[in-house]
Image: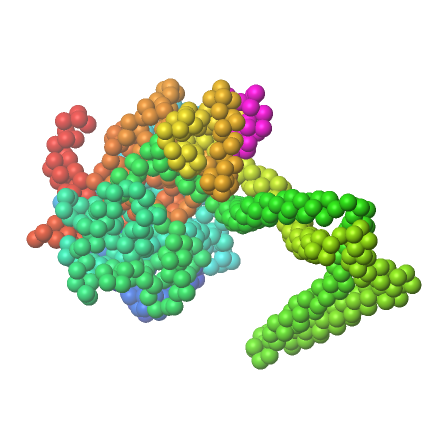
Amino acid sequence: MSDYQGMRWFKCDLQVQTPADRANWRGESMGEGEEAARAAAEAYIRRCYEIGLEVIAVTDHNFLSKAFIPQLRQAIDALEDEYGYRLILFPGFEFEADVGKGCHVLALFDPDVDLEAIDHCLTDCGVPFPRMQKGVLAKSKKRLPEILNVVQRKTPEGRQRGIVILPHIMTEGGLFDTDKISDWLQQEEFLNPDLLAVEVPKPLSKMSIGFQKLFSADGDCDPAWRRKRPIACVMGSDAKAPRPGENADNPLGKRHTWIKMSKPSIEALRQAFLDSESRIRLPDDPATDRNPAERQHHARLLSVDVSGVDYLQDLALAFSQNLNCIIGGRGSGKSTLVEYLRLALRKDGEDSVRADSRTREKIDRIRETINDPSACIRVRWRSRDGVEDSLVYRRRVGASVEDREIQDADTFFKGLPVRFFSQQQLTELTVREGNNLLPLVDAFVRMELDELDAQERELRADIARLFQVRRQRSVIAAERDRLQQEAAELTRQRSARAGLQEAAQVHERLQAERKVAERTRADISTPAGWVELAEDFVESHSPLGSLAEAWPHGPWFKTLDAQVEQAKQQLLADVKAAVHSYRNSVAALFDKDPEWPAISAALDQADAQFEAACTAQGLTPEEVSRVQEIDRTLRAKQAELDGKQHKLDELDRELGPLPKKYEALLQLWRDQFALREQAAQKAKEAEQTPAARFLDISVMYCGYRPGFDSAWERLCPQDRRASLARAWGDLGEALFQYAVTTNASSPWTALEDLLAAPESAPTPIRESAAVLEKHLQSEAVRSTWEDVKLMRVQDQIDLTLYREDGTCAGSVLEGGLSDGQRNTAALALLLAQGNDPIVIDQPEDELDSNFIYRDLVPMLRAAKEGRQLIFATHNANLPVNGDAELVYALESQGGRGRPLAQGGLDLARVSDAVLDVMEGSREAFQKRREKYHF
């Protein structure tokens, strides 16, 4: 497992004084002798550790700490293990120089530089011996350009000797010790491009507007004072005591600066000063401040370990939580490493790779490099909540989670919010037919959309069930109509006998009364099911038992559980009593009613009376038998008819909410669209989208034409020779355009409305309305039509790109953009949404170099502040001007990729690797530079 070697934030105080500067030190004085010096040094370094400093620059006036610094170094050696890290000490000095009205200068040097060399440098800066003259610090008469040349010139080894900071420039003795610009007498010194940093008492945001413009080289800055590049601002304590309250206004820890470095060095400081926007942070309140990295809570890949594969040597890489660039020449394995990450996170399936066959083929090829049974890819992952997992990919078992049980691995891996894009996939994002930009827009409002999507799934399932119920009702209604017709025919046959019409009518009415009475008595048994439900409810109760004994509030919850169980028992008793009361009440309506016995007798004699009426009419026994048979059949038909009607009544009640549910579904689709419109606005307004000035995002409700066409095709008649089938394309075109232009709730509701009022329909639909409606209601198509009515035609996302002069270059849907322009739009949107990790193989492909530097690099610099980016790239703009926190360089050796260097650009081995891999070599870069007339 690799230790992280990229850049990170260091808590720095680049201006501290020590007891060695006796004239300025306000803390406890250092005694005489070596033992006293050791004790003072240990107390001093311990205090630095106590307040969390990681880097200090000892800048006693005129290098009076020369003899004390070795003691400080020894104290660091002694305390390093106790505090778990090594405090870095930059040796240096402060002196007063003849700069304008005279100002102080700090000079810092690498931690391992020989102290004699620093002393010589102070002499070269014009500070004479002795350093103290009659109790007063000796001063330099050299000007700033001379001092900068002395301190910052290159050593024979090519390293920068030291670095200059002008301290406390806004106080007395500083570069700007006046509030009036007319009194600033040191303009020339401030504009010197070799001056990289000044020390300020507070963050830029808390300064006046004038100073903000001045230090940031803002376009509104007075042109006479505007530097070519912003000057770096740092905050130091100028410490004169270890703790507050020791007769000093400036204790250790009063102010500090966060500086991003791989390993503290003069070169690391130089680069940080040159790119202060990316690498320097000034705390608003040093007392409550914390590491900038701790303010970032986005999910991230922590590391990857590759072992036993064919194409790469074993490697271990720890990622930065911000911008990571994997570089290497052809065949070095940078793309392979990216695809290994994809495999380990199980982002190689159809859902992740979509229909991009080239990327899938590439993944398959790379999967073939993991042949050895012991070969594996191990990725450490941390969620945004800080939960860490180890994900392992082996050829035979695929991706799995190590050292813990996963109930549903598919759900786990699908939920990992890492997005992978090959160069081809990036291009596929803006293919007109794919609508692949929709998920990018949705990411801005993912939580809200997820909630609506869940409601939509539930509604669709419920409506689909009700559609099935409606189909069932149609079948039962048809059966009822058949039974009604058969009953009517039987009634006519029975009534056709002369003289029997009146008797038959009386008999029929008595039969109807008997059915009502029988149904009412039968209903007495219905509530018995309610008792069974209540009994099941009581039996389903599961007591807490011993489970709650270990809970903090266990007794209370056990009491609650007992009370709930008691309430359930009471509910059962109440249900039983209510059912018993109901049954008795209904039975009493018959048994205790004085009229019921006579009515019951009349109903019982109905058949006999009708038979007597038949005999009285002189019908033969066979004819009477025939009448009786018809009567029995009629009663059976009527009973069956009553059952069908009862079922229809139940289904009608169940279908009652269907219209409102469908309206709710349509409203959900509208709500989703409204969220996407908000998301499009968020994308344009997002802070990490400098490209917002050249990009416009639009959303068309239900406007994704391929999605509509796919659904419409399902409804097409099977017989393609039929006139309706031949006109099907024109009908779909007319319907889609009508739905879009009228902003219909959906194309399907629009079609229903048009078929109900065809006179207002577009010509193709008006002319085919009758046959089209008959087709949709046919038995063969009806269920498909209901399925289609539940299909959401996706909202269509379009990106419009504008040139630098404000003119429109075209849009994705118009198809007039080049691959580079489309990728430009996709990257802008991709980097603007969310804060989840993004892994892209060569995002710069198809983009011109001017765009990469002018637009892509600012987007990367802004986006990396709040998310992890991992790019395999061959364009130096990304790691260099994008200021990658980690550059991982690979080279090909013996047909296998192997690590060449890793870390930030402040490490010589990394910058050399970038020069060799991405610029062709230092010599090649220098020759190009010369030919550009720089």
Q: State whether the magenta stretch is mostly helix, strand or loop.
A: helix
Q: Is residue 276 above or below residue 886?
A: above
Q: Is residue 892 left or right of residue 202?
A: left
Q: Is residue 52 magenta?
A: no
Quarter of the image where the N terminus is located:
bottom left
Q: How is the image coloured?
A: rainbow
**Place of residue 95 in the rendered image (x, y in percent of width and height, measured from the top left):** 33, 44
Identify the residue shown where x is 41% and y is 46%: 835
**Place of residue 56 in the rendered image (x, y in percent of width and height, measured from the top left):** 35, 54
Res 213 visible = no
Q: Is residue 827 left or right of residue 129?
A: right
Q: Is residue 926 left or right of residue 533?
A: left
Quarter of the image where the C terminus is located:
top left
Q: Is residue 550 left or right of residue 692?
A: right
Identify the residue shown where x is 25% and y is 56%: 317
Res 486 visible = yes
Quadrant of the rendered structure where residue 600 is? bottom right
**Place of residue 586 in the rendered image (x, y in percent of width and height, measured from the top left):** 81, 64
Identify the residue shown where x is 23% and y is 42%: 358
Q: Tell me which segment is drawn in magenta.
A: 744-762
**Place of residue 188 in the rendered image (x, y in percent of width and height, measured from the top left):** 33, 28
- Residue sitting nearer the eye, 92 or 707: 707
Q: Which residue is at the far right?
A: 594
Q: Is residue 455 above or below residue 596?
A: above
Q: Is residue 760 magenta?
A: yes
- Residue sitting nearer the eye, 610 or 933: 610
